[in-house]
Image: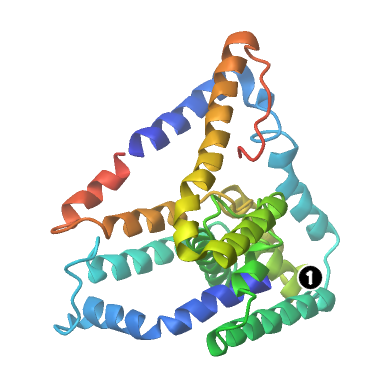
Amino acid sequence: MIVGVVSSVLYIIVMAYETGAGNYGSQISGSLARGPWDFFVKYIRSPVDPDWRKMTFLGSGIVLAAFLYTMRYRYTWWPFHPLGLAAGPAYPVTNVIFPIFLGSIAKFVIMRLGGAKSYRAARPFFVGLIMGYYVGAGISFFVDWIWFPGNGHGIPFSD
Amino acid sequence: MGAGQLVVVLWGLWIARDHLGAVFRKAVFQDPDVDDSDELLSYRTAVFGLVGGLVYLAFWLIASGLEVWVTLLFLCGMMIVYLGITRIIAETGVITIRAVMVPQTFLMFTFGTAHLSNSSMTALAMTAGWHGDMKTTLMPALAHTVKLFDTIKGQKRSWCGRLFWR
């Protein structure tokens, strides 16, 4: 880890001097890098008072999350986990919510039809699906490297 | 931070209060009834490392122009974000998760930017470089590492240094 951190930091600095940091693009020197500064400058120039609408929304969320925790701890039959509320609106869950839903349905059906024994037997298949994604992404990396040098393709959920 | 993540962290701290109290007693008073021999770090190292890190960060933020009260609230929000992300990743199995709300925006819209000095706003803008788009942090990886270390028998602390070399 130390080697990785030191070499990454040094490489970024060296690259900045050799090719110009302004050429890095959005992640380091483009819109994503300027975004926070533009955002803060906007609110320094035009200050705002406390936002009661946002605070009410936050307070409502706190009450709802506390309710979900209370129900989960008091009643074993309660099906909704409070982590769903915490993770649901956040990336990357927002992008993969349907696969998560499919996984939950598959688990529910397997448990109902075959019980824990079937669940354990089915696990290698689902691990294989995940590994298949990584193998496919890995192969595409080499395909891009060989046949599309410097002009590769984005890999979904790779960031 | 987000309401859900906020409650996840505060609820977790409340549930863990007995353990956290024991950790504090061992770290500060060397309570002989608390055994930390099977942990990756001694409780003393963990507690004083955390406190030292937070104090260093606080001085750094204040030196960069953040007001003291904003600094204290920012550090609380920062820890909630780190702990919330770690808890969600560890418990749900997602590979990463983005903080729904970060302390900067929480402070700005809870207290109003009209009540934050320009110096604080500028210092908050600088924190966006290391605590802005909170998505990939070290704490979840270390939480998984500690879980893996549970499978190791015997003296674990000799392995601790290797975390930073692998």
10 Å neighbourhood of mark 1: few (<14), some, or many (≥20)?
A: some
Query: Which residue is the site of mark 1?
Result: B114
Please name the colour scheme applied to the rendered image. rainbow
Give whichever of B32, A122 is nearer the camera. Answer: A122
Indicate the chain on which mark 1 is placed.
Answer: B
- Residue A52 in percent (x, y) is at 82, 79
- The reply, left or right, for residue A84 in relation to residue B83 is right
**Residue type highlighted by circle 1:** Ala
**What residue appears at the point 46 percent right and 31 percent down from the top-left corner?**
A8
Total of numbered circles in the picture? Answer: 1
- Residue B160 in percent (x, y) is at 24, 52
> Up-down: is B160 above or below A83?
above
Q: Quadrant of the C terminus of chain A?
A: top right
**What residue appears at the point 66 percent right and 19 percent down from the top-left corner?**
A152
- The reply, left or right, for residue B99 in relation to residue B24 is right
> Up-down: is B147 above or below B163?
below
> Up-down: is A63 above or below A37?
below
Q: What element carries label 1?
A: helix
Residue furthest toward the front? A113
